[in-house]
Amino acid sequence: MANKVIITCAVTGSIHTPSMSPYLPVTPEEIAEAAIGAAEAGAAIVHLHARDPKDGRPTQDPDMFRQFLPTITKNSDVVVNITTGGAPTMSVEERLQPALQLKPELASLNMGSMNFGLYEMLNRFKDFKHDWERPYLEESDDRIFKNTFKDIAYILESCGNSNTRFEIECYDIGHLYTAAHFIDRGLIKPPFLIQSVFGLRGGIGPHAEDVMHMKRTADRLFGNDYLWSVLGAGSNQMYVAAQSAVMGGNVRVGLEDSLWGSKGTLAKSNAEQVAKIKRIMEDLGLQTATPDEARSMLKLKGRDQVEF
């Protein structure tokens, strides 16, 4: 089982706005359908944000998550991973609430504060449906995603009693050292999932040397205590994922990270991207993990111990 690749699908996220793609799931019904479709296509884990169905604005209202999580768990055995990242415009207390109240098997956790530049998307997307979208992108040249050491400890300690494990999101080499710091403090326990993020403005780049440097550093810091996964933002998605897989890692795809199915062509669904990366894995002679195999690999508490 250890040589099987875990595919995570990040279904909607907070980076892209609804005007950028008609295929981005926004309503609870669309998010549920997208997550189930991704699971059917081969995703073992779905990473979930929520959006206000009126205008697609990111929201961390736990009641919005409650509108789609039961549908997903009723129709799939996929592992549910709830964001604590939310959006850079939110407070840490606001971002924490869904994971705190709903107690998922997995939750994401960014390992630091960082510049979070989305403004370059304005070079490609010109027309917007909702008033909030253009300013959300424009103002990102002066926006910091805040996750201080105090914030990270607060999230880890708050979710500790629920036995939720974390997708440890690392956007740069320093984030790996921050993760090691919290491991030394006993707040992160193995086995843990290190999700290395490449190609987002403000974090490490997507060059092959960057990917190898991140893996070498993680190996040195964490040894056999972790599982490595990657996501490549935008057009970097598939080749970064393929590089990770041949290096023994796991992969994350989905419309949160990239809207594209191929060069210049929008992906019509999350399932399309999952099916594509699964096909690449199989062409490389690799096997992909089922949800229950991912649970075993990560020693998750099980779907019967969540609050949704």
Image (cartoon, grey):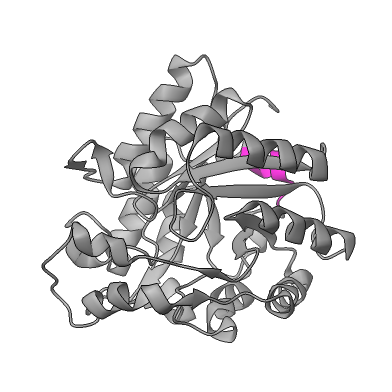
- Relative placement, left or right, of 266 versus 228 is left
Q: Residue at x 36, y 32 (%)?
A: 275
Name the residue nearer the viewer: 3 or 29: 3
158 part of magenta stretch = no
Q: Where residue 216 appears, x then y in whole percent?
A: 71, 36
Would residue 296 be visible to someone looking at this image?
no
Q: Residue at x 38, y 48 (%)?
A: 254
Q: Is residue 297 above or below residue 152?
A: above
Q: Position of residue 46 (x, y in %)?
A: 48, 51
One can see residue 191 in this view: yes
Q: Main secondary structure of the magenta part?
A: helix
Name the quarter where the N terminus is drawn.
top right
Q: How many marks?
A: 0
Residue 21 position in % (x across, y down): 19, 56
- Of residues 116 and 59, the one drawn nearer to the viewer in this rendering: 116
Quarter assignment of residue 107: bottom right
User: What residue do we see at 70% from left, 51% from top?
Assistant: 300
Please state, as top left, top right, bottom left or bottom right, where the C terminus lies in the image.
bottom right
Q: Which residue sits at x=73%, y=43%?
A: 218
Q: Position of residue 38 (x, y in %)?
A: 38, 44
| In-front residue for pair 161/24 | 24
**Vertical side of 184 occupied by 235: above or below:** above
* Magenta stretch bounds: 294-300
In terms of image quadrants, where is residue 150?
Answer: bottom right
